[in-house]
Image (cartoon, rainbow, N blue to C red):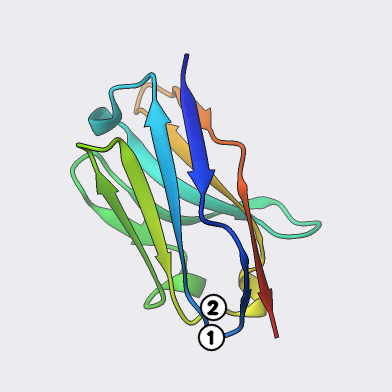
Amino acid sequence: QVQLVESGGDLVQAGGSLRLSCAASGIIFSRYTMAWYRQGPGKQRDLVAQISSGGSTNYADSVKGRFTISRDNAKNTVYLEMTSLKPEDTGVFFCRASLPTGRIYWGQGTQVTVSS
C-alpha cells in the first residue's frame, strides 16, 4: 500500500519560514520524481517545486529564491523549505510521486496559512 504523508503545515506570519516533509512508503522512493503542489482557496492545484530521481530541481517562478526542495532517499522523505513566506503562498500543499511510465501517487495535503 502506497502512502505519502505530508506534515509541517502551520499558520505563520508573512516573512516567516516553514519546512514541509513528505514521508513515502510502499514505493521504491529513489526511483520517483517527487514534487510539491499548492492549491490555493478556489484555485487549481499548481506545481511549486519538483526534484527528479537524479536530484535535478525546478521551481515555479513565484517561489524561486524563497523555496528549496530536497530529498533524503535513505529516509524516503522529500522536503520543502519555505522562507520569506507571503500571504499568496497560502494553500494546501500536496506531495506527489511520479514515474515516467505515468504512475502517480498523491498525499492528502497539509495546510499552510500565511497571515499578513
Measured from the top left, where is residue 111 in percent x and y? Answer: 65, 55
> 116 left or right of 26?
right
Asked if disc 2 and disc 1 are in contact, CB closer than 8 Å, the reply is yes
Q: How much space separates mark 2 and mark 1, taking CA atoms?
A: 5 Å
Question: In which image quadrant can residue 40 be found?
Answer: bottom right
Residue 12 in the image: state x and y as whole percent: 61, 74
User: Disc 1 marks which amino acid?
Assistant: Gly
Residue drawn at x 28%, y 44% is 52
On-image quarter of the C terminus: bottom right
In this view, the residue in front, 3 or 34, is: 3
Q: Which residue is drawn at 47% across and 13% down?
A: 1
- Amino acid, disc 2: Leu
Residue 14: x and y, percent? 60, 84
Whichever of labels 2 and 1 marks the residue nearer the N terminus, that label is: 1
**Mark 2 secondary-structure assignment:** loop
Q: How crowded is mark 1: few (under 14 residues within 10 Å), some or many (20 or more)?
A: some
The residue where tag 2 is placed is 85
- The answer to whether residue 47 is above or below residue 90 is above
Q: Which residue is drawn at 43% across and 43% down?
A: 22
- Please state if 27 lies on the left or on the right of 91 as rendered: left
Q: Residue 113 at x, y = what percent?
A: 67, 67
Callout 2 environment at 10 Å: few (<14), some (14 to 19), or many (20+)? many
Residue beneath label 1, please? 15
Q: Would you place residue 20 above or below residue 104 in this image?
A: below
Which labelled disc corresponds to residue 109?
Answer: none
